[in-house]
Image: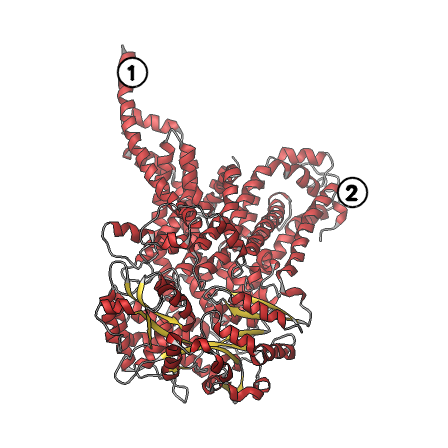
Amino acid sequence: MSRVHLSDEGRVRARQRASGSAGLYLAVGVCALLFLVPFYLIVRNALSTDAEITGENWQFFPTDLQWGNVTELFGDETVPFGRALWNSTVVGVAHTIGTLFVCSLAGYGLARIPYRHANKVFYVVLVTLMVPTAVTFVPSFVLVSSLGWVSSFQGLIVPGLFSGFTCFLFRQYFLGFPRELEEAARVDGLSYWGSYWRVVVPNSLNFFAAIATITFISGWNAFLWPLVIGQDQEAWTVQVALSAYMTNQTVNFHLIFMATAVSLLPLLFVFLFLQRWLVQGIAQTGIKG
Amino acid sequence: MSTPTSPRGAPGIRRVRGVRGPTLHFWLFTGPFLVGLVIFVYVPIVWSAWLSFFEARSTVTPSEFVGWDNYVQMLTSGGFVKSLGTFTVFAAIVVPVTWAFSLALALMVNRLRFMRAFFRSVFFLPTACSFVAASLIWKMSIFSGVRFGLMNTVLGWFGVDTIAWLADPHPPWYWLVIVTVRLWLQSGFFMILFLAALQNIPRELYEAAAIDGAKSGWQTFRYITLPQLRATSTAVVLLLLIAAYQAFDEFFNLLPKATWGQPPLVDLYYTALGENQDYGRGSAGAMILTALICAVTLLQGKIMGFGRGDEEYTAKGGK
Amino acid sequence: MPPRSSFDRRAFLRAAGGLAALGALGACGSNTGRGGGGSGDLTQYFHAYGEEGTQQAIKRYAKAFGKADVRTQWITGSNFESKLFSALLSSDAPDVFEFHPQIQLVKAEQIVPLDDIIEPVKDDFVEADLTSHTMDGKIWGVRMIDDPKFLYYRKSLLDKAGLKPPGTLDELVEASRKLTTDKVKGLFLGNNLVDVARPLIWGSGADLLTEKNEIAYHTDAFAATLGTMRTLFKSGSLLLDAPADYWDPSAFNQGLAAMQWCGMWAMPAMQKAHGDDIGIIPFPQCADAGGPSLINGGWSMFVSAKAKDVDLAKEYVKWLWIDQTEYQEDWALNYGFHIPPRKSIAAKADKLKTGLAAEGVELAGKYGRFDNPHWTQAMITAVEKVIADAVRSGMAPEAALDKCDKTVNRELTSLFG
């Protein structure tokens, strides 16, 4: 008897849930549409002619897809976009590898190697967490320019490698790394250095990948520092080039939006294929700012 | 080649190769990072502190000592102080709005049964976009002041006249532009954080509440979900604040030649790298800002508890 | 570098790989251009001209020089000044660059005098262009082009509204209002209106600085003009937030505005879009004491004091902008219109002798005001802020001007004591 009663109630609930979920899907759907509008605009504008974009009536989609805009973009001499893409790639990759290398070593050292003053050293790192690096861009520029690194890859990459925050994340991660694995390695006669590369790193690839994805994205999307350092057009990154497009003497909508589309491609790739690590990376970096 | 190892637990006894082993390795591991940190973080700050006491226009090796003059100028000339006000307004809008919106997204996505991954990806996708690209889309296409801008087109369908979203600060439509850019870019990121946290809330809590007669919906949200999300919420607010301190890209690109809507970094950029190249004042501004941020961070730490955040992190990170 | 003894071999190789990658980055650094410059190299800075073919032309001239490998930096974006100024400070300063005559370049010893290369052809230059480049008794730059700016208007649209070209600021406000429809705005003065600051000052009967280098713009008439501009700004008849700024003719060409403030360079493009349906006037009178005026802007070549080889840089400037009259003519006339500052070239410029272009030359001669080299970039920015404050943001004009005075006085003190 009670069984029948329950299933009745169950049906009522299911119906309620169905109507509730229709509303839910409507709300989510509207939000999703709004979120996709900018992407729609990029695609529409990138593949239109300027006449279609600036016409009197809104044209929802170009009548002929203008794939020629791609070649036009890379042939345009006023903004060296191909060069900017290359610069961003070099900077993004080098920034990621360099940061991971330097910060993971330091994080491991701080977490696992016994040293009397390790805590004091850690404080030296912690203090820098209080001041976002962007805030000190003026002094950093002064320093880098006196090193003669303005408009160079060194200037774009090196100052960003020493992230107190990434080091902090690695330290926290290594604090939680199972000691047994290392101990086994040490019994096998490996030094700290050896066990780090042979045991710790291979067993932490997920964490490395997560941090790498986040680091790459922030490197690719960085604007203020590349703007300050990239005095020379040859040293522009994609973001600086995009910004220049916005204030260019002439406005070619199709080129500007094609450039935007191209600048997004590498990251969409990251999203499609590395989303797992990206999400994990966000969870890792997000919990503690 | 290899050092005899000392199994953990007996560190004091088996230091066969002396204290040098671990100490040497400690410096080996941390050395490169620390050297870089000193050169690229500490030295600039110290140099800048020095510069801030000099008349340093168009030079980084000045000779004219001016005492606190640059500080006085920065704090009285208006622009910099105004920029702090702008930051306050900006943070006061963008932090709660983004917090609420990303939480709402997370709650909705969490309840989806079909196409959940799809919607999650859609909301998450803007994270790939840079502030520059987003500003470009917003300025050139969505909030363009001409008739073929998207917003003005839509308004035109309802017979509303075109609006200059950015040029005219009264009414301050530019805040709508600035805030929506940030909302679009950041909500997905924080939604992911909230989603992770939502999935960690034990189901039993809801079941128990149902038995106690709590209606699912507002009541469970208010008394179970929200308290359970406290740690994540705190983290999200902190992250949003830190991001707001560093706001530069969209302001720089959306509001050129304006005397309003300039957060501190934009003001410093124009002071130090504009036509005057006034490194002295720029440095003074950077010092003031640094001091302010340190003060705020310490205060936050006091209020929210620095150590506790640490534990939360380890619990999450080590999962 | 970590001591080798403590690693095992494979770990070392792996670490070495990482370091090699970093090293490679370092090596990439020199790829960004300037690094490997020998003494035979020159770098020149140009702001990005919008007219098609300009960049190719500049590169073509540079290539023909023969005595040095000349690299061109074509600086896109609206912040050419700040890019240039920070480059001039750095060790990567350009050897030659285009800019406007401004005295702080001289005071900071950033440029070198060019009297010796100009002397032989001194009489061929327009007097005013020589005056504006003379500071402390020396000539510091070679004028390449003069660029007058006008108010362009669509004749047909004015006729339809029963208007004649506005002669005063009040008439301009009125015309702008009447010309506005739901598809077309009456007037486009640029997205932030800063470029008309000087015509507004001159039109009010004021000036930038006095002979003695004191503030001359801060008058009651100019404050009143700012008030009128505020009315215009809020009238809804101005085109604002257009994708391209005033220097680009596209707003006018796309029919977004019936009148536009723009340079003579855009004249050919506008004629292509609207044929004969275009008229030009100077910026109208703003107060009884003033009169119509227009900016006679332009660009000049300067030689950096930091040039690796100052003589070579000077030789290049002399070769291109003094000797090669053919290129100078090409530059002034074939990519948008500019007035050649050399009388001999201007005399041959047939394209500027008929129709609208001839009218433009005449207006420039009659109402054009040349650069005042004592009016530096910092002061320009200060006045731009007045426009932002008083016109766009609604601050009381007096308050905005007082704020500006502080900045300008500080600059004047540091320049002239």
Crowd around label 2: few <14 · some 14–19 · many ≥20 (10 Å): few
Q: Is residue A209 above or below residue B33?
A: above
Q: Is residue C329 visible?
A: yes
Horizontal side of residue C138 vs C166, given as left or right = right
| Chain letter for mark 1 | A
| Secondary element type, mark 1 | helix
Number of dots carrying numbers: 2
Q: Position of residue A54 (x, y in %)?
A: 36, 55
Crowd around label 1: few <14 · some 14–19 · many ≥20 (10 Å): few
Query: Disc 1 marks which residue?
Result: A7
| Secondary element type, mark 2 | loop
Horizontal side of residue C203 vs A42, given as left or right = left
Q: Position of residue C276 (x, y in %)?
A: 34, 69
Which residue type carries mark 1? Ser
Query: Disc 2 marks which residue?
Result: B1
**Frontmost residue, C296 versus B204:** C296
Q: Which mark is residue A108?
A: none
Q: Position of residue C411 (x, y in %)?
A: 44, 79
Q: Is residue B302 visible?
A: no
For the residues labelled 1 and 2, the Cα–Cα distance comes to: 73 Å
Horizontal side of residue B300 vs A278, given as left or right = left
Which residue type carries mark 2? Met
**Frontmost residue, C16 versus A38:** A38
**Frontmost residue, B182 versus B198:** B182
Say which of marks 1 and 2 sits in front. 1
Q: Position of residue C195 (x, y in %)?
A: 37, 72
